[in-house]
Amino acid sequence: MSYVPFDVIIIGSGIGALVTATQLAVKGASVLVLERYIIPGGSAGYFEREGYRFDVGASMIFGFGQQGTTNLLTRALDAVNVSVETIPDQVQIHYHLPNNLDLKVDRDYQTFLENITAYFPHERLGIRHFYDECWKVFNYLNSMDLLSLEEPRYLLRTFLQHPRSCLGLARYLPVNAGDIARKYIKDPELLRFIDMECYCWSVVPASMTPMINAGMVFSDRHYGGVNYPKGGVGQIALKLVEGLEKAGGKILYRARVTKILLENRRAVGVKLASGDIYRAGTIVSNATRWDTFGKLLTHEETPINEKKWQQRYQKSPSFLSLHMGVKADILANNTECHHILLENWEKMADAEGTIFVSIPTLLDPDLAPPGYHIIHAFTPHWFSDWDKLHKTEYDARKEAVAGRIIARLNSIFPGLDTGLDYLEVGTPRTHRRFLGRTEGTYGPIPRRKLLGLLGMPFNRTAVPGLYCVGDSTFPGQGLNAVAFSGFACAHRIGVDLGL
Ligand SMILES: Cc1cc2nc3c(=O)[nH]c(=O)nc-3n(C[C@H](O)[C@H](O)[C@H](O)COP(=O)(O)OP(=O)(O)OC[C@H]3O[C@@H](n4cnc5c(N)ncnc54)[C@H](O)[C@@H]3O)c2cc1C
């Protein structure tokens, strides 16, 4: 069946998509969002089991500050007159690292610097210089509206208003955080710590992590801070959908797009698994780059620049997730919400090397039954290790990995094994199935050291009428980053449509 055309069709309802959709709806475009799953949010979604509400992925949320211009989640919600109540997290991460490096990243910048300097007193100045340089990048970003770098008039206007910030940012665009860290810091253990500071959100070491992203994360955690949405991370997407519908936009669930339709090489519509066809002058894909070019468009339809991009960037591993419900009394009184555990530096980037932990009920107890907490522990794992396993082998492998992770977590949460009330294990196959992401990947990572963010594609593609949004586009992974991509995408489309 075919329907009345929309101005814009958006494939998927991750945060990048919903920011694009809401921004375009308030500009007056008729917008249709097509989501294959039953709820919105993608990697920022949730699921409920036996009285627990689990976040499927993201839980350390930036972008909820009240000042500046980098608070993009606050701004995206405001734009459609909705809001999410948030709970400030006083500590971004409690690191449990090799050689007894046990460090908390405090919301207060000076306290954080003192904590880290206590471990590396001989690097006092280097530490201060490195993190201060991150602030420089952040202050440049935080002084200007963050919109499409593909829009020349915006670039000119911004340059005239903020020449210093623009020139400063241009200087950092091709730079990686490791280059700056090595300028100031010599201690190899401290450089490994900086690697972990980057790896825990970029999934690559500092030498391959763009300085622009590092500047955002390492400064905003002390500026707008890390804030948890009351009711769980899923609230962000639910509220954006509420705002989208209030602004006249439409969203359909269980609407899996199988094909982007081209006419004379221009994107003109989409076909769903149901056979339904929807048409629009503008199509936006929130699917990963690998799903967009290669699945929704055939190899033959994929432009050459996309094939070249795939030679520069590869899929990062997926995750193995343990979603646990635990008795509250196994956690000590001063336990923090987010933890990182690694026992051996050599294994930082290996499958099952670094373990990420989030305990959101320490901030919002209503996500679990009284007397219980949620612990979400996850660690990188490759899809290839789980693909094509027979059910018995798949289940046995899940049980074995869960056992190993719980045994390691017992070192920071003694009694975890005996305090378990609920356990569900998600594998890279689960991530692929529920998030619609090829091989369950967390997103693109450089194949080798590249020039900072310069290689990341923006929202326009070489297929007329087709745009991309989300973590396969500039500036990459993370909710605030994909919100940036959403603002930029809507801005570029708005100009193209004359809105
Ligand atoms: C385990 C984990 C932990 C994370 N932790 C954090 C964190 O603490 N903080 C943080 O900021 N970020 C975190 N992230 C990263 C963050 O969640 C993502 O970068 C971000 O949510 C990606 O948003 P997106 O817009 O690219 O879309 P996605 O979240 O990828 O959503 C895409 C949507 O499109 C839908 N879709 C795909 N294909 C189709 C199709 N063909 N038809 C219809 N619909 C389709 C999918 O179902 C999905 O809903 C984490 C991610 C994971 C997996």
Image (cartoon, rainbow, N blue to C red):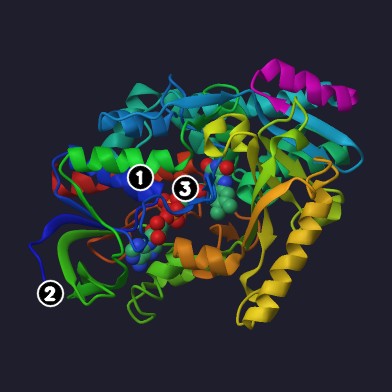
Q: Amino acid at mark 1?
A: Gly
* x, y percent for residue 173: 53, 42
Residue at image location 37% in from the left, 43% down from the top: 237
Callout 3 touching callout 1 (CB < 8 Å): no
Using the rendered image of the protein, determine whether residue 299 is visible from the camera's viewpoint. Answer: yes
Q: Is residue 472 magenta?
A: no
Q: Is residue 112 magenta?
A: yes
- Residue for badge 1: 486
The image shows residue 414, relative to residue 120, as above or below, that is: below
Residue at image location 88% in from the left, 27% down from the top: 119
Q: Is mark 1 within 8 Å of ligand 1?
A: yes
Using the rendered image of the protein, determine whether residue 476 is visible from the camera's viewpoint. Answer: no
Mark carried by residue 379: none
Q: Which residues are magenta?
A: 105-122
Q: CA distance from mark 1 to mark 2?
A: 30 Å
Task: Please tell me whether mark 3 or mark 1 is closer to you in this view.
Answer: 3
Q: CA distance from mark 2 to mark 3?
A: 31 Å
- Residue for badge 2: 1
Element type at mark 2: loop
Q: Amino acid at mark 2?
A: Met
Total marks shown come to: 3
Callout 1 touching callout 2 (CB < 8 Å): no
Mark carried by residue 44: 3
The image shows residue 25, relative to residue 466, as above or below, that is: above
Q: Is mark 3 within 8 Å of ligand 1?
A: yes
Q: CA distance from mark 3 to mark 1?
A: 15 Å
Element type at mark 3: helix
